[in-house]
């Protein structure tokens, strides 16, 4: 039942427990009460003081008045509490949590490339570089000082290092008895790092201290683009890929890491949130017990194998050769990285190619980007 008299353009719909605003939008009582901006309900920091657990189940509106300057004042049945809202503030959508990704292939991508001196001296250059990384899932930095551990200091220019069992940073070079294929001179198919962690590090940085004479070229592939192609080609297989968890594991003398998640993770709106793909650490799935399970596993594999084949397609591989002082950063839940095999020189001098890597998380990067943008917009 609608209250018969619209109050200055606002109608209280008691039956459906909502206010109907002059433009036809609907404000449920609970939603409206929860966002009361008064000093009792909302701290000066912007954080909510009002505890939604205290909201009476039979919450009602006693009065609602819209004044000429579009301020809506509501009197609640709850202790006659009064809330005054700017109509405009009720219409504002929350800021998006992430930049909409721009999918890319090798032919069309314009890599976000910056110079170390520029991003350390000019906030605008840093902001532009970070924006590119957030949009495309990777970026390049040149003329980084060639120094031990510098990779971690670069991560700290815009975020926080994620320390793992590999340390604050780690070396990538061919060694005599490696526990990880990264530390050989073998080529590595494009992969995401550390899928056996929960949560997965969302950023990886790799910094070149010494390059090999031949080979060892790096390649980057947009996993969101690959996921989109698999989805279009094999919709049923993609549905399995994005719902069936896969296990990953890493074991050495002192560490045992295991995690389980679908190869492609989706957001509630169906868009891709993350990919994880690393054949080195993927564990075999359970043996099917019936035809249905076997059919599912076969379809899952068809989609998985298409995913891996697409990773090898030159049209999707952005190739780069790292020289000393070059660094790349990838969104490790989106852009897969790999390398071609390289000459490890002689047994006596293994490890000509020397990179150092570290992990970080994308929330720090997005925060720095947002704060730099805030300063530019003159906000706060
Ligand atoms: Fe890697």
Image (cartoon, rainbow, N blue to C red):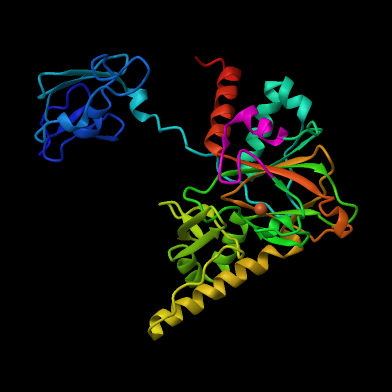
Give the x, y percent position of residue 287: 44, 79
In the image, the segment drawn in magenta is 149-170
The reply to whether residue 28 is visible in this rendering is no
Q: Nearer the viewer, residue 156 or 182?
A: 182
Observer-nearest of 259 and 296:
259
Q: Position of residue 84 (x, y in %)?
A: 25, 17
Q: Nearer the viewer, residue 279 or 22?
A: 279
Residue 207 in view, yes or no: yes
- Up-down: is 265 above or below 12? below
81 and 111: which is toward the camera: 111
Image quadrant holding the N terminus, namely top left
Q: Quadrant of residue 171?
A: top right
- Residue 81 at what x, y percent from top left? 15, 18
Q: Is residue 165 one of those drawn in magenta?
A: yes
Residue 321 in magenta stretch: no
- The picture places residue 350, in percent across and down from the top left corner, at 83, 55
Is 279 on the left-hand or right-hand side of 214? left
Q: Reply above or below: 252 against 373.
A: below
Q: Is residue 85 above or below residue 217?
A: above
For this view, does 59 lie left or right of residue 25?
A: left
Residue at (51% x, 39% y) in the render: 98
Whether residue 83 is situated above or below residue 294 in the rendered picture: above
Q: Residue at x 74, y 51 (%)?
A: 108
* Residue at the (18%, 32%) spot, across then down: 53
Tell me what residue is drawn at x 75 percent, y 35 percent: 148
Labels in figure, total: 0
Which of the 4 image quarters holds residue 224? Answer: bottom right
């Amino acid at each position: 039942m609608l209250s018969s008299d619209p109050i200055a353009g606002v109608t209280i719909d008691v039956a459906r427990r909502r206010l109907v605003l002059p433009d036809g939008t609907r404000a449920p009582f609970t939603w409206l009460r929860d966002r009361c901006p008064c000093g009792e309900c909302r701290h000066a920091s912007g954080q909510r003081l009002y505890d939604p657990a205290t909201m009476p189940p039979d919450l009602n509106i006693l009065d609602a008045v819209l004044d000429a300057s579009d301020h809506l004042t509501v009197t609640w049945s709850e202790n006659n509490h009064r809330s005054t809202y700017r109509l405009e503030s009720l219409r504002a959508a929350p800021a998006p949590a992430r930049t909409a990704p721009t999918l890319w292939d090798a032919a069309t991508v314009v890599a976000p490339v910056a110079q170390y001196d520029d991003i350390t001296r000019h906030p605008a250059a840093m902001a532009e570089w970070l924006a590119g990384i957030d949009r495309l899932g990777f970026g390049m930095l040149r003329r980084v000082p060639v120094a031990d551990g510098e990779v971690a200091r670069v991560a700290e220019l815009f975020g926080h290092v994620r320390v793992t069992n590999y340390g604050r940073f780690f070396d990538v070079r061919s060694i005599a008895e490696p526990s990880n294929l990264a530390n050989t001179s073998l080529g590595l198919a494009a992969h995401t790092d550390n899928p056996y962690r929960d949560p997965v590090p969302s950023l990886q940085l790799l910094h070149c201290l010494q390059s090999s004479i031949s080979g060892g070229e790096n390649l980057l592939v947009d996993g969101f683009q690959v996921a989109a192609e698999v989805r279009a080609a094999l919709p049923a297989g993609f549905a399995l890929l994005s719902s069936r968890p896969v296990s990953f594991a890493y074991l050495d003398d002192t560490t045992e890491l295991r995690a389980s998640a679908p190869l492609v993770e989706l957001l509630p709106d169906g868009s891709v949130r993350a990919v994880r793909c690393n054949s080195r650490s993927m564990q075999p799935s359970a043996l099917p017990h019936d035809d249905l399970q076997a059919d599912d596993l076969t379809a899952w594999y068809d989609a998985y194998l298409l995913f891996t084949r697409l990773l090898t397609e030159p049209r999707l591989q952005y190739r780069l050769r790292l020289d000393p002082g070059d660094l790349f950063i990838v969104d490790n839940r989106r852009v897969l990285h790999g390398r071609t095999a390289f000459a490890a020189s002689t047994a006596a001098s293994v490890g000509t190619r020397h990179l150092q890597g570290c992990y970080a998380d994308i929330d720090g990067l997005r925060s720095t980007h947002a704060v730099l943008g805030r300063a530019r917009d003159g906000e706060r």
